[in-house]
Amino acid sequence: MDWIKIGALADIPRRGARCVKTPKGRIAVFRTAEDEIFAVEDRCPHKGGPLSQGIVHGASVTCPLHNWVISLETGQALGADEGAARTVPVRIEDGQLFITLEALSNLAA
Amino acid sequence: MTEKLVIVGNGMAPGRMLEHLFEAAQSRYEVTIFNAEPRVNYDRIMLSPVLSGEKDYEEIIIHGDGWYIDNGITLYKGHKVVAIDRAAKTVTSNHGVIAQYDKLVIATGSVPFILPVPGSDLAGVLTYRDLDDVNAMLLAAQSTAKAVVIGGGLLGLEAAAGLKARDMDVTLLHLMPTLMERQLDPAAGYLLQKAVEARGIKVITKAETKAVLGERKVKAVELADGTVIPATLVVMAAGIRPNAWLAKEAGLEVNRGIVVDAHMHTSDPDILAIGECAEVGGRVYGLVAPLYDMARVAAARLAGDEAAAFVHSDTPTKLKVTGIDVFSLGDFADGDGREEIVLRDASAGVYRRLVLKEDRIVGTVMFGEISDAAWFADLKKREVDISDMRDTLIFGQAYQGGPPLDPMAAVAALPDDAEICGCNGICKGKITAAITANKLASLDEVRAQTKASASCGSCTGLVEQLLKLSLGDAYNPSAVQPMCPCTPLGHDDVRRLITVLGLKTVEAVMQELEWTSSCGCAKCRPALNYYLVCEWPGVYADDYQSRFINERAHANIQKDGTYSVVPRMWGGVTSAKELRAIADVVDKFAIPTVKVTGGQRIDMLGIKKEDLPAVWADLGQAGFVSGYAYAKGLRTVKTCVGSDWCRFGTQDSTGLGIRIEKFMWGSWTPAKVKMAVSGCPRNCAEATCKDVGVVCVESGFEIHFAGAAGLDIKGTEVLGLVKTEDEALEVIVALVQMYREQGRYLERIYKWARRVGVDEIRNQIFADKDRRQEFYDRFVFSQKFAQVDPWSERASGKDKHEFSPMAAVGLLQAAE
């Protein structure tokens, strides 16, 4: 599998996110309070809001546009809402972060 | 014909007596009360929470003025009875009022014991007895730093904790080797001392006070061993004595207290005595449960019930200091034929001791974890033979067979005569019967119907469990709307606890208040961040990851993920230079839409996030700062041209608007704040639908607030009229600060005003000049840290990560 280096863990604030531009669309990379890392397409299943701009709590993010709560582990909308953002495999090695886009078909641009 | 009942004293015992009496014989007596304190009947047990700031006086009133009126009671507030004429059957007050009685009840309570040492009469030496004492202490806590509390019993500990919560440097002196030695054994006393010291209170035991030093005002306390402790406030809480001099003067039999029989009659058959001033069977009492029992007996006698009699029983002691749980009941001294079972968990600070005699519990001391207190008390009261469960007795009820660790099971298993509320002597059966019979559904209703949990409140958890048991899922435990699913606490509770416990980070709040989630949610985090910003200006480090994106990025997110930018235009006034700068920015960054806002400024929409710092840099060159159009904070101050141009203008509304905006920009508030200043009552700036508005008139400035023109439409309330611009600014600033301190997160001013009451706000801002000044000063202080332009900071590189992608990968290949 082709792993692409995207930066260091320390580049992302705890309970925050940064985004990565890729040919397949924008990907949001999240860091939780416990330093877990998740990558999810930067697009809320509701109305396409940029999830990377939301508030990160536990292993979830609340979309900044209409407060949908998305699980970072599964990409699924939590609670009463239905829908899912696609997740992207991410790896940490020596504090460096890598993602792979092979499993991903084109995201909406 | 109605008989005349006169009561001397208006504390908790006579209040309770009257409730019983009106229940049994509503119109038999015409009641007159003399109260030496200038107020109604309040819950003296709750003075400690008032001192520490966890409650207000209003919250501890038992009978408001309306209750006296409804029951036809004549209440003389601030009248001290100075003489009883038993032959003429009259009493006389210090203001000369004379009242005739058929029956007289003396309930003069107790007086604090003042140590007979030199200097005990100096200014700054207080006692801890009534609301006046608490008010005096609060006043002293504002201006002075060092306090000495003499007495390590219940009262002294509560006073020390309360003063500490008010940020005083507190030293607690206690004559005996361990604290609360009358209620606690030395081990529990030691744990208590450690817990008290952990709060920053210095404790000196075996401390014999020799003198209070000072000229006119107290300066220090000197101990017998020569130690001198500097102090500007000394609280004497070394005990109380029955207040019996009036009875003694009248020739009634007085020993330590006023001697009464089991029916509460004194040596004069027409005079009864109840409460702390009374001595029954050689004992005087200071805890509320036996005093309420006296009230019950006296009421029954007055209603004609000859059988009612007072019987002594042991009363449990609990300390009312938030976070320190202590329980003590019965006799716990070592002795012949006595055995004990002890459980200690040093790291958790838990200590339990049961004293047994002939396989029955005769005493209990608990520290740190007291959830089984009711069960032990019940076993003691019913004198249950515990030999079968002796091995596991100390672990509590949950370990006596059956499914362990189900708190509901424990309560369900209690017998009907188990006492739940110690203060009021209410047992389980009475509570469950009231719930069923009267279809009670809330804690407040149970309190109103049965009195259970209505005094000190420490049995609230048990009463809630009984509600849950009786009603099942139909019971909704908290009338308070929780802040979010992460906590059962409401916004007001959380704020109060942030202040009282001195919590200064989001993590500390979640840890100390036992959040159920690891790092909160998108509802509570922004709220907590605001509460901390507001409470600890200059100390709390703003947590940007707990802010919504608009406040984090200092711009407004749009539906497509781009942002809009609104620079401040003070009072809606602009210039050619500013407009040119905006035009240049729009061209340079190809900003698709430029729109004039409702708040008299210009909005540039459709800016890419990466461009924001550069846009701000260019705007900053022209002198623009952030307009905070994205903030729960001060947004715009809309104005008309006023006396500068308008032929109707009465004042310089534009100038005042700009002045307000320059004074208040940068402040964070619970929700957005929009203002306006109109130069005359024609009100072209539409000030009467704003959060805060000013309508200028010939005679001055009419200050408005609590308007709305969004989801709700509501005209403003008039706060008041002031004569000068300076005063207008002061009033507005104080009002906004009051809202900042009391408003719940996302609650607009009009909703806050509806909750708190317009009159209350007017009282605090307009009538109470000192209060206004305090609000004003606190706002000015917090502005020192708030007025930093976030745009220029970010144009200079702050929070760079926020505005650039982490990486762009594979784009070259894609282009190929």
Image (cartoon, helix red, strand yellow):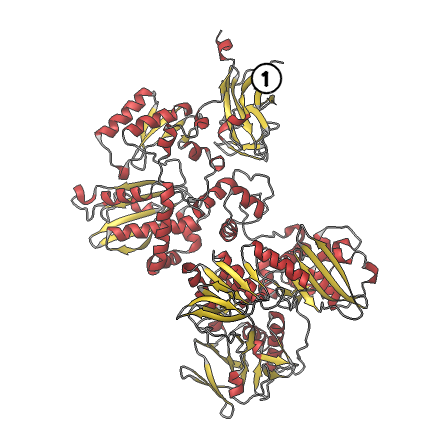
Q: Position of residue A106 (x, y in %)?
A: 55, 15
Q: B243 left or right of B592?
A: right
Q: Residue furthest right?
A: B388
Q: Residue furthest left?
A: B647
Q: Quadrant of residue B586?
A: top left
Q: Residues within 10 Å of mark 1 (few under 14, many from 20)?
A: some
Q: B631 left or right of B683?
A: right
Q: B696 left or right of B714?
A: left
Q: Position of residue B620 (x, y in %)?
A: 31, 29
Foreground pick, B326 / B608: B326
* Number of numbered discs overlaid on the protein picture: 1
Q: Secondary structure at mark 1?
A: loop
Foreground pick, B359 / B235: B235
Q: Is residue B154 above or below residue B13?
A: above
Foreground pick, B316 / A42: B316
Q: Residue furthest top?
A: B816
Dot 1: chain letter: A
* Residue found 68% across the figure and 54% down from its top: B350
Q: Quadrant of residue B573?
A: top left
Q: Amino acid at mark 1?
A: Thr
Q: Position of residue B329 (x, y in %)?
A: 68, 66
Q: Residue furthest bottom?
A: B87
Asked if residue B357 can be seen in this view, the reply is yes
Q: Is residue B233 above or below residue B721?
A: below
Asked if residue B487 can be seen in this view, the reply is no
Q: Position of residue B528 (x, y in %)?
A: 49, 43
* Residue found 42% across the figure and 60% down from its top: B144
- Which residue, given by chain and number where applicable, does mark 1 sit on? A100
Q: Is residue B351 above or below residue B95?
A: above
